[in-house]
Image (cartoon, grey):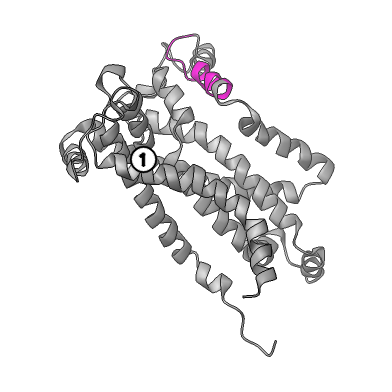
Amino acid sequence: MRLDRLFTLAFFLGPALLIVITFFFLPLLLTVYTSFTNMRNWNVDAYLFDIVGLYNYKVLVHFAKYDPMFRNALITTVVFVAVTLVVNVLGGLTLAILTFFLEERISIHYRLLWLLPRMTPVAVYSLLWYYFFHSDAIGTLNRILLLAGVIDKPINWGSYMLPLGTWWILIFVNGLVGVSFGMIVFYSAIRSIPWEYIAAARVDGASNLVIIRRIIVPMIRWHLLFVTVWQMLSLLTTYTHIFLLYEWGVVDRIWGQTWSLLVFNLAFLPVGELRQGLAAAAATVLVVIGVILGLVTLRILGFQRMITRPRGDI
């Protein structure tokens, strides 16, 4: 490789690589190292801990088998990630297609409306749903149903038909945020498709459904791949909205905890019983699962076929 090309690559990729190494790889290495120690509180015994090998991972396996908190966190994570991922990808794609076929002066208002959950601060957004799903009569949903005569007393939605009530709230609240992200990416991808393709299809008598199936979806497969992988990894590690709903008592304390929230609680709550070595082991397991799922998803969605140079006389 020529020296000028190496300099160009270093100039453009160097800052990004420095940021990734500093804020991702180094903390990851520190987390893996901490997972092999019996550290409880970094602020107190940062230098007073021993290397315990795979002890924390053995404890995780034991807890996953016999401790309901760990076992339920695993089940909740699987259900939450799987269902919310489908909602985010298909919901975002549906919104993008619907707004694409509307006039621009009309569709822009719908897109702005769906962007509100993403633009709203996390605490404010979670507070809105705290009052919406509140278990007393002051809750918006309970108030509407009481006035309509559908129910005769307030319902604790987080504990309703456990664990379905809690799962439904987590999926609904996080799904609205994820749908807006998919809508942005998919709408931009659809708008980049040459209009001649769609115009030619309409001349041939193709319906909107045929245009979607034969033109739009095949031509945005890169964006479908990106959104699916990105949203899956994001859902695996998200905990901000879940943490607030969990702490405010909107969701059930047993079934409302995902694996990422479990890592946070082990590391920082409760204050007197921190187990940061065990939390680091749980976080490392989450990273490994994320890498495996990401690679499997890329393979299933045909990433290798997308980057293969087409055959021909070019």
Residue in view at x 61 percent, y 55 percent: 14
User: Which quarter of the rendering shows the C terminus?
Assistant: bottom right
Q: Considering the whole magenta stretch, tell me its main secondary structure.
A: helix
Closer-to-camera residue (260/10): 10
Please, what is the three-letter code of the amino acid marked with disc 1?
A: Thr
Q: Which residue is identified by label 1?
A: 77
Is 235 on the left or on the right of 222, as rendered? left
> Splitting the image into 4 quarters, where does residue 310 fall?
bottom right
Tell whether position 191 is magenta: no
Residue 49 position, x and y percent, is 23, 32
Q: Residue furthest right?
A: 105
Closer-to-camera residue (64/145): 64
Q: Does 17 sit above or below residue 126?
A: below
> Splitting the image into 4 quarters, where does residue 201 fall?
bottom right
Closer-to-camera residue (189/133): 189
Q: Does 248 sit above or below residue 94?
A: above
Residue 241 position, x and y percent, is 48, 28
Is 159 on the left or on the right of 138, as rendered? left
Residue 79 position, x and y percent, is 37, 42
Q: Residue furthest bottom?
A: 313
Is 160 on the left or on the right of 3, as rendered? left
Residue 75 position, x and y percent, is 30, 40
- Work out whether residue 161 can be spotted: no
Q: Does 132 sit above or below residue 109?
A: above
- Work out whether residue 304 can be spotted: yes
Residue in view at x 19 percent, y 46 percent: 54
Instruction: Please provide the residue range marked out in magenta.
Output: 124-137
